[in-house]
Image (tube, rainbow, N blue to C red):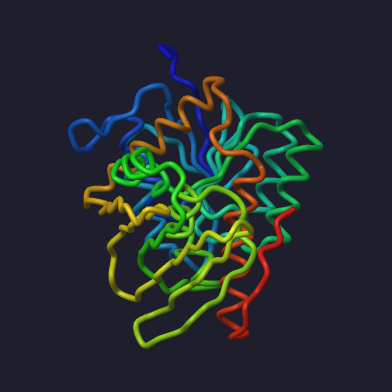
Amino acid sequence: MEQKMKVAMIGLDTSHSVEFTKRLHNVDCLEGQAVNGIRVISCMRFPTPFQNEEGQDARQLQLEEMGVKVTRSFEEAVLDCDAIMLEINDASFHLEYFRKCAELGKPVFVDKPLADSIVNGREMIEISRRHGLAFFSSSPLRYASALVAACSRMPQPAAATVWGPLGAAPAGSSIIWYGVHAFEMLHAAMGCGALTVMADRDMRGGIFHVDYRDGRRGVVELTANAYRYGGVLRNHQDDEAFFTVAPGAEFYTRELEQVTKFFHGATVPLSHEDMLEVMGMLDAAERSWQSGQRESVYYL
C-alpha cells in the first residue's frame, strides 16, 4: 500500500471528518495512531441538525489546514477521488448520498450507522447489489482492541452483556444514532442470529434484551451521560471474558486500518448480513423503546 488512494469525504456534521483526517494525514494524532495508505483530498459540507454553520466553518478550517478542499458541491468533491467515505452524522441522509455514490462505481465506506431505519438499510444493500458496489458500514467500537481480545479468548459466547452511552440525537432516533456503538460490540461478540429485542426503560437510560434463535442471550445497556464502553462475555461453563475500552479513541485507528485495506482491494470486512443484522437490532430496539413491547429483528 505504498501509493496513497485519493478519498473524498461526504459530510462535515461529524467530528469524525476531522479526527479521521488527522490520522490519515498524520497530523496532531497520538503516537501509533496514524494510518498510511489514504489521503483525503476533498470534503463536501451541507447543513444538518447535527452541526451548525459556525461549527462546520471551524471544521472546514481544520481540514483546509491539512490540505483538504472543502466544497458544497457533490460533483466537485468526488471529481478526482478513488474511493468515498460517507461521514454524515445525520443518518437520514445516508440513503440519498449512497445512491449518488453508487452511480460512480467507486468503493464506499459508510460511517455508523448504516441508515436511519431497516427499510432504508435494506434499500442501500439492494442498490449495492444492483451496481455491483463494494462497500461496508461499521462503528469504530467494533474494532476496539479490548473487545477484539475478548472475542478471541471467547469466540462463541453463550451470553454477552455490553454497555455504552445513550447520546441525545438532535434529530431522529438517539438509539439508532448512538446506540449503534454498543449494538455493534454485541454483534462482534455474538455474530448473527438475533430474533427479538425488548427495551426496558429506567431513569438512567435503557436496557435492551436480545434473544437469539439458538437460545443465546444478549444484553445492551445504554446510559445517558456516561461515556464508557465495556462488557463481559460468558460461555456455557460460566467462564467470563471482561473487557473495558480505554479512552483515547484508538478504535478510530483500528477502523481506519480496515477501511484502508478495503479501499486497497482487501475483502469487505463485514457481509451484507452482518450490516443488516446490526441495523435490524437497532430498528427493533427503537420500536421496542416506543411500544414497550418485544419487537422482531427482521433483516433479510
Q: Residue furthest left?
A: 31
Q: Position of residue 107 (x, y in %)?
A: 61, 30
Camera-nearest residue between 169 and 43: 169
Camera-nearest residue between 78 and 111: 111
Camera-nearest residue between 223 and 28: 223
Q: Residue furthest front?
A: 237
In the drawing, does residue 47 fall left or right of residue 28? right
* Residue for point 42% across, 46% down: 142
Q: Quadrant of residue 78?
A: top right
Q: Position of residue 118 (x, y in %)?
A: 68, 61
Query: Compared with residue 247, is residue 196 higher up or lower down, i.e. above or below?
Result: below
* Residue for point 66% across, 42% down: 272
Query: Compared with residue 114, is residue 266 higher up or lower down, i.e. above or below?
Result: above
Q: Quadrant of residue 210?
A: bottom right
Q: Quadrant of the N terminus?
A: top left
* Residue for point 44% across, 13% down: 3
Q: Position of residue 94 (x, y in %)?
A: 62, 53
* Residue for point 54% across, 47% down: 191
Camera-nearest residue between 240 and 205: 240
